[in-house]
Image (cartoon, rainbow, N blue to C red):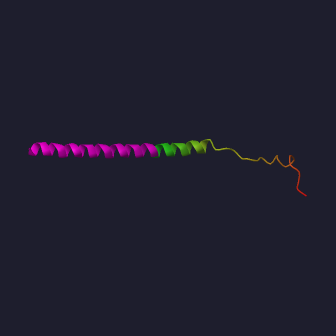
Amino acid sequence: MFEYELHKVMHAELLRRADLKRLAGEATRARRSRRDARRTARKEAEGPVSTGGDRDRFTHAA
């Protein structure tokens, strides 16, 4: 009977460790995807909005 109880405890411990490892992997993947998204956003950043050529398109207010 003692061996069966020991087996149950070890089984529960292994399940707990597997869950912790899985959660750590998910956190690492999430952190990487956020970092990659920031890098991509920086690379694809838009250029200047106005180039100074808009002055002749609009009239001045009175």
* Nearest the eye: 4 or 13: 4
- 31 vs 59, left or right, is left
Residue shown at 23% from the left, 45% from the top: 12
Query: Looking at the rendering, in which quadrant would you find the C terminus?
Result: bottom right
Residue lying furthest right: 62
- 32 vs 11, left or right, is right
Instruction: Give how far across and how far down residue 37 sits, in percent.
Output: 54, 43
- 3 vs 36, left or right, is left
Residue shown at 82% from the left, 47% from the top: 54
**Image label count:** 0
> In the figure, residue 6 lies in which quadrant?
top left
> In the figure, residue 42 lies in which quadrant?
top right
Magenta: main secondary structure: helix
Instruction: Give how far across and how far down residue 38 sits, in percent.
Output: 55, 46
- Magenta stretch encompasses residue 55: no
Instruction: Give how far across and how far down residue 7 sits, in percent.
Output: 16, 42
Residue shown at 9% from the left, 46% from the top: 2
Query: Looking at the rendering, in which quadrant would you find the N terminus?
Result: top left
- 15 vs 52, left or right, is left
Residue lying furthest left: 1
* Nearest the eye: 58 or 41: 58
Which range is magenta? Answer: 1-30
Residue lying furthest front: 1
Residue shown at 31% from the left, 44% from the top: 19
- Magenta stretch encompasses residue 9: yes
Instruction: Give how far across and how far down residue 43 sits, in percent.
Output: 60, 42
